[in-house]
Structures are given as structure tokens and as C-alpha cells.
Image (spheres, rainbow, N blue to C red):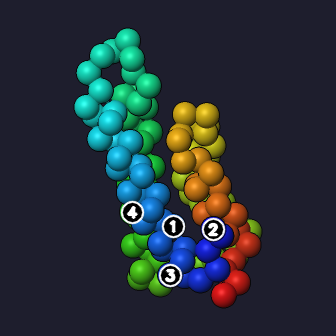
Amino acid sequence: MTPKTRDEFLDLVDQLIFEMEEVLMCAQDEGDPEDSVFSDLLPVYEQLTADLKKLHAEIMQGKHAFGEDRDLPFMPLANKWKERLPFHNLFATLNAVNRQGLTG
């Protein structure tokens, strides 16, 4: 689903925050250093989760502008690790809508 309104965009941000927090819990609980699928990227997951929460707050405060053909600030980090981010497609959707602007 591609968000068309501010509320739909916020719903997708919330969904991605939830998914990232789930990954964070898995990474924090992962105990076997030889099976560090998630735990070796713990700092990346933490940073992206914090960045998503900041984006959410900025939108709620009316401090975020859509449609300025600019990437979201966390996209370089998300793109760098896209092969290891289970929900990179959601980051890409958020970024595309942010660049193009809301249509609804």
C-alpha cells in the first residue's frame, strides 16, 4: 500500500517502527555469537528506529515537508544495509512518497 495522506504515511511509519522494534528484540535476545544474523546490526537497527520515531514526531508537529524531491535523512543508512533489513521495502516506500509528496 502506498500512502496517499498524512495519516496513511504515519500509519506506515508506525508499522515500520513496530517491525524494527521486533527485530531489535530478536537482536537483543540472540545469544549465539556464531548465529548473529541480527545482533551484529544492533546499532543500525537502533539508529533507524530512533530516526523513524524522530520522523513521526516531526510530522505530528507539522515540521516535516513532503514532496521536496529529497531523500529521508536515514535512507543512506537504510540503503547501505538493505540486504540485511527485513523491511527495506517499507523504507523505500516511505522515501518514495516523501520525495514525490502526498496525493490525497
Q: Earlier in the sequence, mark 1 or mark 4?
A: 1
- Residue 84 position (above or below residue 99): above
Q: Quadrant of residue 9?
A: bottom right
Instruction: Name the element at disc 4.
Output: helix
- Residue 92 position (above or below residue 56): above
The front one of 31 and 40 is 31
Mark 3, residue position: 7
Q: Which-is-in-front pick, marks 1 and 4?
A: 1
Q: Which-is-in-front pick, marks 4 and 2?
A: 2
Mark 4, residue position: 53
Mark 2 Cα within 10 Å, few/some/many (few <14, many 20+)? Answer: few
The residue at the point 64 percent across, 61 percent down is 93
The residue at the point 38 percent across, 42 percent down is 23
Mark 2, residue position: 1
Amino acid residing under circle 3: Asp
Residue 11 is situated, as x and y percent measured from the top left of the image, at 47, 72
The residue at the point 39 percent across, 17 percent down is 35
Instruction: Name the element at disc 3.
Output: helix
Q: Earlier in the sequence, mark 1 or mark 3?
A: 3
The front one of 69 and 82 is 82
Mark 1, residue position: 12
Amino acid residing under circle 1: Leu
